[in-house]
Image: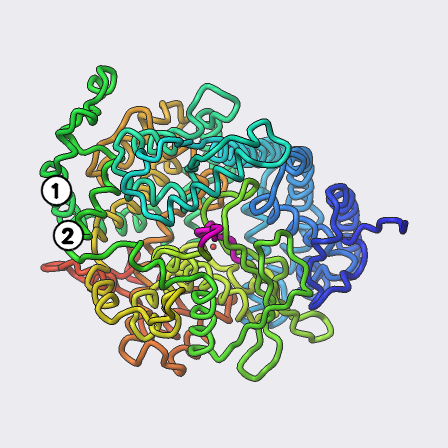
Amino acid sequence: MSEHKNPFFEPYGTPHDTVPFDRIRLEDFEEAFMEGIRRDNEQIEKTINNPEKPTFDNTIINTEEDEGYYDLLSRVSTVFFNLLSAETNDEMDALAQKMQPILTQHANDVRLNPKLFERIRQVHLHHRKLTAEEKMLLDNCYEGFVRSGALLDEAGKNQLRQLTEEASMLSLQFSQNLLKEQKAYSLDITDEKQLDGLPETAREAAALTWKERHNAVGTENQTAGQGWTFTLDYPSYSPFMTYSTQRELRKQMYMARNTVCTHANSENNIEICKRLVNLRREIAQLLGYKTYADYVLKRRMASNTRNVYKLLNNLIDAYKPTAQREREELTKLYMKSPSTKSSSEKPSAKDSKKGHQADKMMPWDSGFYSHQLQMKKYNLDAEMLRPYFELSKVIQGVFGLANKLYGITFKENKEIPVYHPDVKAYEVFDKDGGFLAVFYADFHPRKGKQGGAWMTEYQGQYIDRKGENVRPHVSVVMNLTKPTEEKPALLTLGEVETFLHEFGHSLHGMFANTRFESLSGTNVWWDFVELPSQFMENFAIEKDFLSTFAFHYQTSEPLPDELIQRIVKSRNFMTATACLRQVSLGLLDMAYYTQKHEFADDIIGFEKKAWKKAILGEQLEETCMTVQFSHIMAGGYAAGYYSYKWAEVLDADAFSVFKRHGIFDQKTAQSFRDNILSKGGTEHPMTLYKRFRGGEPTIEALLKRNGIKNKGRQQTRTDRQDKPRKSADKK
């Protein structure tokens, strides 16, 4: 038997130098981490002991182009932390707990190294004539060190080390707690009558989950019999809340999902959230900012908290009247429904005391009655469309869209190693036939996978010292409906939109064409990074796009025009309510990170007050979003969740150009690619956007798309500042 070699220590020897997942063992990670840190330190010593005068080339490029021997730490970190989100287990979680403080300490050692910073400072003050991209790299490098504490005195640096190390550990603990709590819950049903209202697809998926959990080989319940298991994974939870007529069971599911990480157990995240808010405030104030939001927004298009609140308040003003009418319409339907008067719907005395009244619409009723209302108004629901959205056809459609717009093609390569059988790997070729990228797609939920959907990279794009354009390896990770024993994976329209969203991020990565990796692809300011993704969602309801792939999985009949018309007519169904939901999350985020003093409030009570302005429905005292709000607690969107609405203004404005010239217009698409998708963070995002659009964006295209009337309101520019000047200020 041959001796195992750590694959991180040698050339991968795989197609396009892709990660050899099939050869990596758990013990390889720690060994590679420690060797990577050693090599990093060796390179830093060489840089700071260089007797030559500090220059852009011997200092800045040295820290950026850490190729070959020296990039080990980056390579192993990328693989490990991507897998920690997509395919973790108890052993990986334990290793993450062990390595996180070591890695944070190393990062601090680099950023707080006075000799290294002095060389960077000298280059920042005295440098040769630089290209725009070189200047951006230099500015980012210098400001990155400053924002990481390089200007602090020794006592300040020591304090910063303590704060950042604690914050990194708590963020990791938050994510691990959330995954364990979400995956631990299940609703097991053995009485088929309790499946009333649920579509066949939901029943089949639940039956498969029951078999997987109860009849697994080696378990005590190997002969558990017939049953149905529903989980908090979106493809299971959402249909249950939409179609189940069993109000009490909807309530159980809703309360399980919305009280995650609030229980008296080791996965409770309440104190972790409090501490994270305070740690980030302390870090910001140590660095000279009043609040953490002030610290974050200095490197964002929004620039300051006033502009964020201006956007959020403008959206509330524009959408709340319509959202209130939507709520009233929903309530009327609820009150007319016989089920609200049913004796089986009567609450317990305990529930009545809390306001859980049978004659009052509750949060677990919203999805069910929204579906009823949509059927009444448009005769449309997600199950009607599922047969036309078979996953393999959707993949063809999304790839075909990229081909129509940009001329690129995708070819599955089964020789490229993957980390799970669900994952597919593709080679991507440009319109001239040249290799463009590797694209991984990971579609379905499973035990070791975080909820939600995201795009990431295993290798970023850059041009190496030999002049070779190193192409990226990008990945999209989702939690879409799984195939069952009876049917292939049939998606909802919402899941198609999710695929398009993450695919938009991947195009941002695949089209990257910059010199430096830290400026390529999605390495842009975070209130700009959602533009390419949200832009792609616009195609989901376009007839010319749907007609390319939406065929019935059994009959091959195309999606009927009449159904497409109903989709288009219903596109703004409950859109104002959905907008206020996003705004409410933005308000909650800002409320935490504009704190100037120690945060000691009760998390649940604070949350209810923070977003009250944008909340129309019932708020239950037991529920809490904060403790599962990964974006702002562990996902890098702290003081940045508004970015989704900020970028929505941009994406609506950008798509209006395509609507004017044709949604497949290649000239417009090429301009979008050349000016935005390929440029990464090499220039200010508004400069890039204006180069594509010919001007600054306004909120008008979004209001028009959503059917919101904007009478008597002035145009609102997304980058308007307190002074009449150009605007200043990613995942």
Can residue 314 be seen at all in this image of the molecule?
no
Residue at the spot of label 2: 376
| Colour style of the rendered protein structure | rainbow
Please name the residue shown 30% across and 70% down the image.
542
Other-residue count near label 1 (Cα within 10 Å), few / some / many at <14 / 14–19 / ≥20: some
Q: Amino acid at mark 1?
A: Leu
Tell me if residue 484 is in the magenta stretch: yes
Q: Are marks 2 and 1 in contact (CB under 8 Å)?
A: yes
In the rendered structure, the answer to whether residue 557 lies left or right of residue 363 reads right
Can residue 192 be seen at all in this image of the molecule?
yes
Q: Amino acid at mark 2?
A: Lys
The first of marks 2 and 1 along the sequence is 1
Please name the residue shown 28% across and 71% down the image.
656
Q: Is residue 602 above or below residue 674?
A: above
Whole-Å distance between the Cαs marked 2 and 1?
10 Å
Q: Is residue 396 above or below residue 262?
A: below
Please name the residue shown 38% across and 30% down the image.
256
Q: Is residue 620 above or below residue 317?
A: above
Please name the residue shown 60% across and 30% down the image.
219
In the rendered structure, the answer to whether residue 105 lies left or right of residue 280 reads right
- Residue 615 spot, x, y in % from top left: 23, 38
Q: Secondary structure at mark 2?
A: helix
Other-residue count near label 2 (Cα within 10 Å), few / some / many at <14 / 14–19 / ≥20: few
- Residue 138 spot, x, y in % from top left: 59, 61
- Magenta range: 476-486
- Residue 333 is marked as 1
